[in-house]
Amino acid sequence: MAQPPQPELRLDSDAGAVFVLESKGKWWHAGFHLTTAIVGPTILTLPYAFRGLGWILGFFCLTVMGCVTFYSYYLMSLVLDHCEKAGRRHIRFRELAADVLGSGWMFYFVIFIQTAINTGVGIGAILLAGECLQIMYSNLSPSGSLKLYEFIAMVTVVMIALSQIPTFHSLRHLNFASLVLSLGYTLLVVGACIHAGLSKNAPHKDYSLESSSSSRVFSAFTSISIIAAIFGNGILPEIQATLAPPATGKMFKGLLMCYSVILVTFYSASVSGYWAFGNKSNSNILKSLMPDDGPSLAPTIVIGLAVIFVLLQLLAIGLVYSQVAYEIMEKQSADVNQGMFSKRNLIPRLILRTLYVIFCGFMAAMLPFFGDINGVIGAIGFIPLDFVLPMLLYNMTFKPKTSSLIYWINLFIMVVFTSAGIMGAFSSIRKLVVDANKFKLFSSDVVD
């Protein structure tokens, strides 16, 4: 029987490890990376997720997802710490899973899911950034002729330039700015939603769910998948790899920083947006604030600043989620014995990263399905990686007694979220198919 791929302990000869995942960071740098990986403009989708769940279930799912993901990421950090103390330091999710579970197919399963997540987020970041530019353009020039795909092309060019930043650790200052930007646009959007809800042009507030019971079920599981994607972070081992060893205990402090920001941003955005627009909430709440068939529901300067903040943060998010792809490219193409900026390594890096970003930009322009993409990614990507595997890895590593509470908590979470992932995948793909009738390739409108 074929042996499962083994973790590569000779990290000094691994170009992906030495160049992209260099281990120099402090715990607060991990906090910046985690916050950028989780707290992004996808929070503008939370009111849309609430419209498929309602107030009570929406609050319940948001809180449960938050608690479970924090617990899940903490367990994974413990597993990584345990392996490091045993002399098996892991810097990649796929190698951690293969080592702990002793399975060759798990190595390929994780790398497949990670690639789908990272590419999906990369596409979504470019798409939403292009939409932000389109929003600004349509306000400055209502009769302008530029289309969405042209703005996506502009963003893609900027991302190609930024993609040449060689290491994950080099993004720490950019990711601190990303953290500040997330707080900034959340404050602006919350204020804009409160203003919209209280204005004379306030939309009628209707919080009722869909009339058909089957439609309500499908919408609920789609919303659960969206929330899972919003909380998701499929690159935690890679983030922990950027910490200067020993990494023990540092990740917990980074998680506390990240979830403090989550507490402030997620609840305020979901509550204010759903309160203002109810079941008419758009998959991007900024579009709800700027309806096509009426006046803007918030001051232009407020929306304009929020859009600029979102646009700038999207560049950081696109970079963070590209690091796994860049690490794989570097591992296969670079020569660790030559300098990071040597001609031998610089040219392949330039070509490969440029091609990757162009692919993401092309897909964003061709398939403008932002809300639906979030749901599918959450169901088939983030749920197994963030809500199932960490508990399994913990139970396999520490082997808690079957009579212990933690064993049964982990088992319960795995069963519940596996079921939710299956239902979420079905409902999200169903909605994607239904919405396929509403768009054309390279459309200038993002389908909800």
Image (cartoon, rainbow, N blue to C red):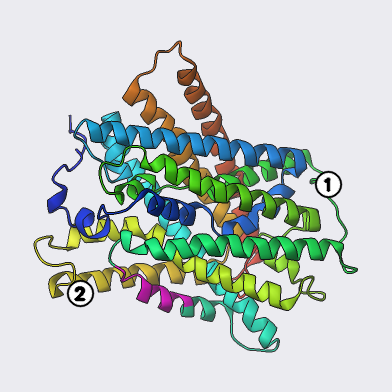
Amino acid at circle 1: Ser
Instruction: From the image, tell me which residue sits under label 2.
Output: 347
The one nearer the camera, 115 or 300, is 300
- Specify the segment rendered in magenta: 155-165
| Residue 426 visible within the image | yes
Q: Is residue 289 left or right of residue 129?
A: right
Q: Indicate the position of residue 435 as horizontal and vertical percent values.
A: 64, 59
Q: Residue at x 64, y 59 (%)?
A: 44
Q: Residue at x 50, y 40 (%)?
A: 383
Instruction: From the image, tell me which residue sits under label 1.
Output: 208
**Residue 191 counted in the magenta span:** no
Q: Looking at the rendering, which quadrant does residue 63 occupy?
A: top right
Query: Quadrant of the image for the C terminus?
Result: bottom right
The one nearer the camera, 444 or 236, is 236
In this view, which residue lies farthest toward the left?
337
Mark 1 or mark 2: which comes first in sequence? Answer: 1
Q: Is residue 149 left or right of residue 24?
A: right
Q: Estimate how packed mark 1 is, as few (under 14), some (14 to 19) or many (20 or more) residues with alpha carbons within 10 Å.
A: few
